[in-house]
Image (cartoon, helix red, strand yellow):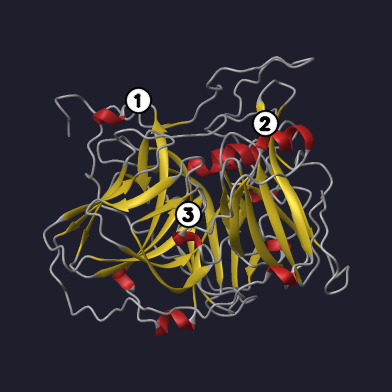
């Protein structure tokens, strides 16, 4: 289809007609018989180069997908029943997106490396998908922390929406843009008792942004914008290609299609929504200003359903909502994006719902009032309080480098929580941008955000608050594994380290920041202190 008689140019969103492609629901992964594992518990998923059409007016283009599809197949699991997954790297030896060889661990390792992280999982460290547990095709080469080919997900956690994606050291940003992401839906008995919309009426939505070249292939930038380098002593020539400060696409794709539509019945639907973008945040709203019924966050169900008009999703954050279309027969409703950071006339809309299907049967699903009994963590139980500044520096090429606690990835681990301890972490954001901070292994609660005197902290290291504490936003009051650390604020979270010891990570989930050293190790150690020592400030 042409817009104003212009031929479709995938590089120019003004020429791309919206809502031409039907939303695709990712297929559900099927288990594979294996005598070494219980029946229906073992899966093999291949990472493959494939051809994918993002829009009906685009040519097919190269992607890398789990089982060759974008998004990958949805893995469905049950609480407390172990799922075993072997992710097989069958990818080419050369990457089709630009590789920056100046980043940590890239220059002297294979160009194509992968490892899968199940984001949000309570899992042993050997199955967590540590960035240095990478491997190449057929395990010909493996990273220093690679331990096993099969990931064992014990699923000892409440039912929730998780996702699996690539996490290879310094390649995450391009491997995810290439297509390596998929849903992992963990179900429990509470979910069934709640009588939520299910089957055809439960739909996962993976929202991402992409830019394309004129031939329909995926565009990924190779140079910094604005141009760097900045002057630093002994500056080296800028790498080409170089890591950027963030990949921001000029189109929005949902489940692998550019601006799709979904035909719905006039009834309730459950949507599990994930921001799988590298850098872009979304502020979701329905175009008719109707309420959405939020039932869950990153880590599972809320204590009670919350009616919301808008919800902000930073990269890696999830939200679980029920939308009731029963009063909107024959209407069209758009899922809007009101985020202003990279706003334009095209990316301010995500997809379209068309309420044009007949009601097939009576809608007996419910919007529950009470969901999960509350299990709060209490600040007075905290063993340790950590003040962790988010900072910036220049690397040896003069590029801006965002950092955690003024440390680089390869510096020795400083976050060493003890098993069965409760900790409070304060993210002190001194940088001019917000950051979605993700902790592996644990789900946490957001306690507050509080503005502080940034200049005083940067110059003298003194933390002076300039305003009152702010409660979590209404859409982020449940269990979380990713939190927006606001500009000029201290973001305070609390978590309980339990069940597992070993090597994990915490990092910014802006993938370009993560790949350029805004990532640090977590080493969970065996109990090393009394139950209730005095609070300490580790930094």
Measuring from the top left, give residue 132's x and y in whole percent: 73, 48
Residue in the foreground of this view, choosing between 518 and 260:
518
**267 relative to 81, above or below:** above
- Which label sits in the foreground, 3 or 1? 1
Q: What residue is shown at x 79% (from left), y 49% (from top)? A: 144
Q: Is residue 371 visible?
A: yes
Distance between the Cα atoms at labels 3 and 2? 35 Å
Q: Which quarter of the figure has residue 480?
A: bottom right
Q: In the displayed structure, does residue 349 sit left or right of residue 494?
A: left
- Front in this rendered view, residue 473 or 333: 473
As measured in the structure, the alpha-carbon distance from the residue carrying label 1 to the one carrying label 2 is 31 Å
Residue 478 vertical position relative to residue 78 in the rendered view, above or below: above
Contact, CB < 8 Å: mark 1 with mark 2? no
Residue at image mark 1? 214
Q: Position of residue 377 (x, y in %)?
A: 65, 72
The reply to whether discs 3 and 1 touch (Cβ–Cβ < 8 Å) is no
Going by the image, does 210 lie left or right of 90?
Answer: left
Does any portion of residue 497 appear in the rendered image?
Answer: no
Q: Secondary structure at mark 1?
A: loop
- Camera-side residue of 79 and 97: 79
Q: Quadrant of residue 3?
A: top left
Q: Which residue is mark 2?
A: 401
Mark 3 or mark 1: whose residue is earlier in sequence: 3
Residue behind mark 3: 67
Q: Which structural element holds mark 3?
A: loop
Nearest-to-viewer mark from 1 and 2: 2
């Amino acid at each position: 289809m042409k817009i104003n008689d212009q031929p479709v140019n995938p590089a120019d969103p003004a020429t791309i007609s919206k809502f031409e492609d039907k939303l695709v629901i990712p297929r559900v992964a099927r288990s594979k018989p294996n005598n070494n594992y219980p029946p229906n518990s073992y899966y093999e998923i291949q990472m493959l180069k494939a051809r994918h059409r993002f829009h009906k007016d685009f040519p097919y283009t190269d992607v890398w997908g789990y089982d060759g599809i974008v998004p990958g197949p949805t893995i469905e699991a049950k609480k407390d029943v172990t799922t075993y997954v072997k992710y097989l790297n069958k990818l080419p030896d050369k990457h089709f997106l630009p590789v920056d060889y100046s980043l940590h661990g890239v220059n002297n390792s294979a160009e194509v490396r992968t490892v899968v992280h199940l984001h949000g999982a309570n899992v042993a460290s050997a199955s967590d998908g540590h960035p240095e547990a990478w491997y190449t095709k057929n395990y010909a080469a493996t990273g220093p922390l690679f331990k096993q080919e099969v990931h064992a997900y014990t699923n000892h956690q409440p039912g929730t929406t998780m996702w699996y994606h690539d996490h290879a050291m310094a390649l995450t940003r391009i491997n995810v843009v290439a297509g390596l992401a998929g849903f992992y839906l963990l179900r429990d008995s509470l979910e069934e008792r709640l009588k939520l919309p299910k089957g055809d009426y439960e739909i996962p939505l993976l929202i991402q942004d992409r830019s394309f070249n004129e031939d329909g292939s995926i565009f990924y930038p190779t140079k910094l914008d604005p141009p760097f380098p900045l002057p630093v002593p002994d500056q080296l020539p800028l790498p080409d290609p170089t890591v950027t400060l963030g990949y921001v696409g000029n189109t929005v794709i949902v489940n692998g299609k550019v601006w799709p539509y979904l035909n719905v019945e006039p009834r309730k639907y459950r949507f599990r929504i994930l921001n799988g973008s590298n850098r872009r945040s979304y502020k979701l709203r329905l175009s008719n200003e109707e309420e959405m019924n939020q039932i869950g966050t990153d880590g599972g169900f809320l204590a009670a359903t919350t009616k919301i008009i808008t919800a902000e999703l930073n990269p890696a954050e999830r939200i679980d909502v029920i939308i009731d279309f029963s009063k909107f027969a024959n209407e069209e409703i758009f899922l809007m994006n009101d985020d202003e950071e990279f706003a334009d006339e095209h990316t301010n809309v995500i997809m379209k719902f068309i309420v044009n299907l007949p009601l097939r049967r009576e809608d007996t699903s419910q919007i529950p009032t009470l969901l999960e009994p509350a299990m709060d963590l209490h600040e007075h139980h905290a063993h340790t309080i950590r003040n962790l500044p988010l900072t910036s520096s220049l690397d040896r090429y003069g590029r801006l480098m965002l950092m955690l606690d003024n440390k680089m990835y390869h510096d020795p681990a400083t976050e060493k929580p003890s098993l069965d301890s409760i900790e409070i972490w304060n993210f002190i954001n001194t940088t001019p941008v917000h950051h979605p901070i993700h902790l592996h292994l644990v789900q946490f609660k957001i306690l507050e955000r509080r503005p502080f005197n940034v200049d005083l902290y940067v110059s003298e290291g003194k933390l002076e608050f300039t305003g009152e504490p702010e409660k979590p936003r209404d859409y982020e009051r449940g269990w979380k594994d990713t939190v927006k650390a606001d500009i000029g604020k201290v973001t305070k979270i609390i978590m309980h380290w339990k069940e597992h010891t070993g090597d994990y990570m915490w990092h910014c989930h802006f993938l370009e920041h993560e790949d350029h050293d805004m990532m640090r190790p977590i080493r969970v150690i065996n109990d090393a202190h009394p139950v209730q020592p005095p609070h300490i400030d580790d930094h």
